[in-house]
Amino acid sequence: MMLCVPMFVGAQTLTFTDHEPMGNMRTQVTRQFFRLVEQESKGRIRIDHHWNGELSSSYDAYETVREGTKADMATVVPEYDSQRMPLHQLFKSFLAGPSGEAQVALIRKAYKTIPELTEELHHAGIHPVLVATGYPVGFYSREPMADLSALKEQTWRTASFWHISYLENAGATNKRIPWGEQVSDSLRSGAIDGIMVNIDSGWDIGAHRAAPHLLVSQELWLGHIYLVAMNLDRWNALPPKDKRAIERAASKTYKAMGKTMDESYEQMLQQLSNEGCTVRRLTHEEVSDFVTNVRQSEVQERWVKKKESEGTADVRRVFEKLRSLVQHSAKRKQ
């Protein structure tokens, strides 16, 4: 049964843009959040949502929402603006992390206990109203791999500067290729042996058809933060009751997010299997060994020192707090 929310005369409309098409796990979560915003505000707020890059590309989303002319809100990926949001890059530095409800809880706690994260966004002119991540990372390969040690002396493609370092430390060569059809072509031609990417992005470009062997683990969290962010001036101008309505809507969204993520992950793996992809789930020990073998701590420390030398304030404190949260979450799982 559809819930009909009465719209008040003079209700305000917030324009939102997302770079992905409506329909995948993350965008469905965002759409549900908007329904709850309209419900919790009793119709005082309406969201005019635009998908598939209609108003802004993923790389332009930050500028779009910061300027606040074409859109009041956007899905902002901090990785695409690493110079202005350096502290947010630390999430993806962790190869392994919690999944489902535990992942949602960790991210919420991070923003509650590490004020520097929100301060960084406010300094950049935006306010986070909902924080989500995507599917876990997977390794799509042209040929079967017994385990991740098979990466040695192969040529792979990944995008994150963190993942490039980890692939190289595993003995692989990273080849820079623009995302999309060129990656699929390179897999088909054998120019690359595989790709390290969140499993849904691999699905989107049909990577599993040219690289039908997939190693996965929910522990290989993407760490790729997707912010539903609002123009800071627009947020500050909202009446307190509307801010509270948005915060209540976010809280309700978070409560359902973990289950949605788990169910969607299993559905995605089933879809891949149905398409002929061979899926093998890595064990906890394999993931732990990979994190050690690619020298994650060494790579993180080197990056933190570099940012300190460049004058990035609070980077070590934020790193240590976030590392503590990730480690604590791992211990609770054990």
Image (spheres, grey):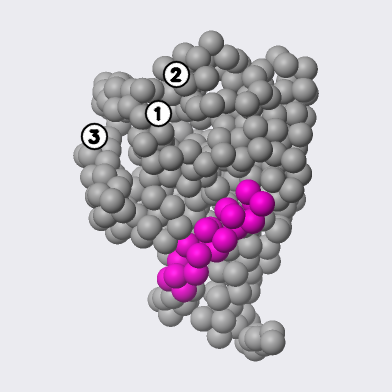
**Whole-Å distance between the Cαs marked 3 and 1?**
24 Å
Look at label 1 and name its amino acid: Phe
Mark 1 falls on what kind of element? Answer: helix
Asked if 181 appears above or below 225 in the picture, the reply is above
Please indicate whether residue 299 sits to the left or right of residue 256 in the image. Answer: left
In the rendered image, residue 264 lying in the magenta stretch gets the answer yes
Mark 2 falls on what kind of element? Answer: loop
**Nearer the observer, disc 2 or disc 3?**
2
In the rendered image, residue 207 lying in the magenta stretch gets the answer no
The residue identified by callout 2 is: 170
Q: Is label 1 in contact with label 2 (beta carbons under 8 Å)?
A: yes
The residue identified by callout 1 is: 290
For the N terminus, give its image quadrant.
bottom right
Look at label 3 and name its amino acid: Arg
Q: Which residues are magenta?
A: 250-270
Rendered image: mark on residue 316: 3
Q: Position of residue 152 (x, y in %)?
A: 50, 14
Number of other residues with Cα within 10 Å of mark 2, as a class: few under 14, some 14 to 19, many 20 or more: many
Asked if 111 appears above or below 42 in the picture, the reply is above
Asked if 68 appears above or below 8 in the picture, the reply is above
